[in-house]
């Protein structure tokens, strides 16, 4: 990857090892359950998270949507963060595809729901209201600087769910980033969720795919939902082969991406006209914005980065920038990005 692409960790190319594994993958028909590479990936994801079974799906969005559909029936309600991926970035899929009501609640600075508010909004048994069925979390929390949420929060969320007869789904698209930042095994987070969706193409370099994990009974339901959503694949072992490397190898090097993100954040804090708090950078997401007296606006800066320096960087819908480090962003590329921004803004 010659250009510097900081728009997302989804832009990361498969590694050479992944390309070789994909080319030589043993395959079968996954709809019949006989693709050995897919089966190995699903078993590995389940083992690493302490769950009974896994299901390979096409994307993080599909992973969340099949999970919601498996947990909830028509007219049931899922409680989510108002700025969560499930509520904001999945095209209203829960309501459209599965007739699930989604109740968005406020989150704090790192993406936690107010647990007293959660208790308040769990519905009583009333025919006028939807049935509260599911509590949803996210870790790391994408819209809150990629914050790694401590485990105690999920322990408390689990307790509420158990007390009130609800299930817990975790959008764990970047759960290994969260575990790395917290310095714990991913199982310590996973133990408090009934289901987890783990994205293989965010930070883990696979070209596509997510694995959903949970009990065997849950995965049986999720597989039906996957079929309904058009997510059944055939010789998917070609993709799963890359996913196995994602889980075995790429999860062990995420601290490097975090180090580069912190280097970028610290460097940005020394550039005039930029607002950033490096202490908020836990993982591989770096959010920053411009001061009011900046000589250029967001659009002008991203245009110049692209056309003059071959650097791609994402905006956050008019309120700033998001830069995401990944396997293909080296320390040298971080420094080149900082140099380019200094040149543009000076």
Image: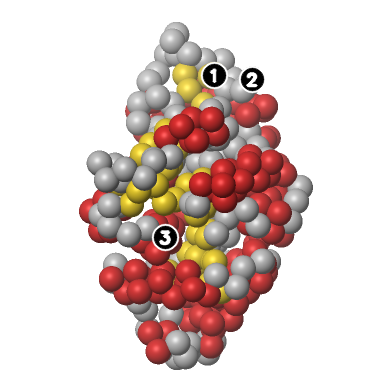
For discs 1 and 3, the disc positioned in front in the rendered view = 3
Q: In the shown orientation, is residue 141 left or right of residue 229?
A: right
Q: Is residue 336 left or right of residue 128?
A: right
> Residue at 31% across / 43% down in the picture?
126
Is residue 260 visible in the rendered image? The answer is: no
Sequence-wise first label, 1 or 2: 2
* Quadrant of the rendered image containing residue 65: bottom left
Q: Residue furthest top?
A: 293
Give the spatial CA distance, label 2 vs label 3.
48 Å
Give the class, few, some or many, for how many residues have Cα within 10 Å of label 2's Cα (few <14, many ≥20): few
Q: Quadrant of residue 146?
A: top right
Q: Which residue is mark 3?
A: 71
Between circles 2 and 3, the one closer to the viewer is: 3
**Residue in front for this viewpoint, 322 or 188:** 188
Image mark for residue 153 = none
Q: Are marks 1 and 3 in contact (CB under 8 Å)?
A: no
Residue 334 appears left or right of 27:
right
Of the pair 199 and 310, the residue shown nearer to us? 199
Q: On the image, numbered disc 1 is attached to which residue?
A: 275
Q: Is residue 247 above or below residue 22?
A: above
- The residue lying at 38 percent from left, 36 percent from top is 104
Say if 14 sits above or below 80 in the image.
below
SS for dot 1 = strand
How many residues crowd around disc 1 within 10 Å: few (fewer than 14), some, or many (20 or more)?
Answer: some
Q: Residue 157: x percent and y percent?
A: 58, 43
Query: Rounded to the nearest whole Å, what is the CA distance between mark 1 and mark 2?
Result: 9 Å
Q: Position of residue 198 (x, y in %)?
A: 53, 60
How many marks do you count on the picture?
3
Write the residue at 42% across / 35% down: 121
Task: Identify the disc placed on residue 270.
Answer: 2
Q: Nearer the viewer, residue 217 or 60?
A: 217
């Amino acid at each position: 990857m010659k250009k510097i692409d900081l728009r997302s960790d989804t832009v990361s190319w498969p590694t050479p090892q992944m390309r070789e594994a994909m080319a030589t993958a043993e395959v079968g028909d996954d709809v019949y359950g006989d693709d050995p590479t897919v089966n190995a990936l699903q078993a590995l994801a389940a083992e690493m998270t302490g769950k009974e079974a896994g299901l390979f799906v096409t994307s993080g969005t599909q992973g969340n949507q099949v999970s919601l559909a498996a947990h909830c029936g028509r007219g049931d309600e899922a409680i989510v963060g108002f700025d969560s991926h499930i509520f904001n970035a999945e095209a209203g899929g829960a309501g459209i595809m599965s007739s699930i009501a989604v109740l968005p609640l406020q989150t704090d600075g790192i993406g936690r729901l107010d647990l007293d508010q959660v208790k308040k909004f769990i519905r009583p048994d009333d025919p006028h209201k939807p049935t509260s069925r599911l509590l949803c979390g996210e870790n790391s929390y994408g819209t809150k600087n990629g914050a790694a949420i401590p485990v105690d929060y999920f322990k408390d969320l689990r307790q509420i769910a158990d007390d009130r007869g609800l299930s817990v789904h975790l959008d764990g698209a970047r759960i290994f980033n969260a575990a790395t930042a917290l310095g714990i095994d991913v199982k310590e987070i996973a133990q408090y969720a009934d289901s987890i969706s783990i994205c293989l193409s965010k930070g883990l370099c696979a070209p596509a795919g997510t694995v959903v994990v949970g009990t065997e009974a849950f995965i049986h339901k999720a597989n039906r939902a996957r079929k309904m959503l058009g997510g059944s694949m055939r010789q998917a072992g070609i993709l799963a082969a890359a996913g196995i490397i994602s889980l075995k190898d790429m999860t062990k090097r995420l601290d490097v991406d975090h180090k580069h993100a912190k280097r970028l954040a610290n460097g940005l804090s020394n550039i005039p006209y930029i607002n950033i708090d490096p202490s908020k950078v836990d993982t591989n997401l770096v959010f920053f914005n411009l001061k009011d007296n900046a000589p250029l606006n967001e659009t002008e800066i991203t245009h110049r980065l692209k056309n003059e320096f071959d650097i791609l960087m994402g905006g956050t819908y008019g309120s700033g920038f998001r830069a995401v480090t990944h396997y293909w962003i080296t320390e040298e590329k971080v420094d080149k990005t900082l140099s380019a921004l200094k040149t543009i803004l000076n």
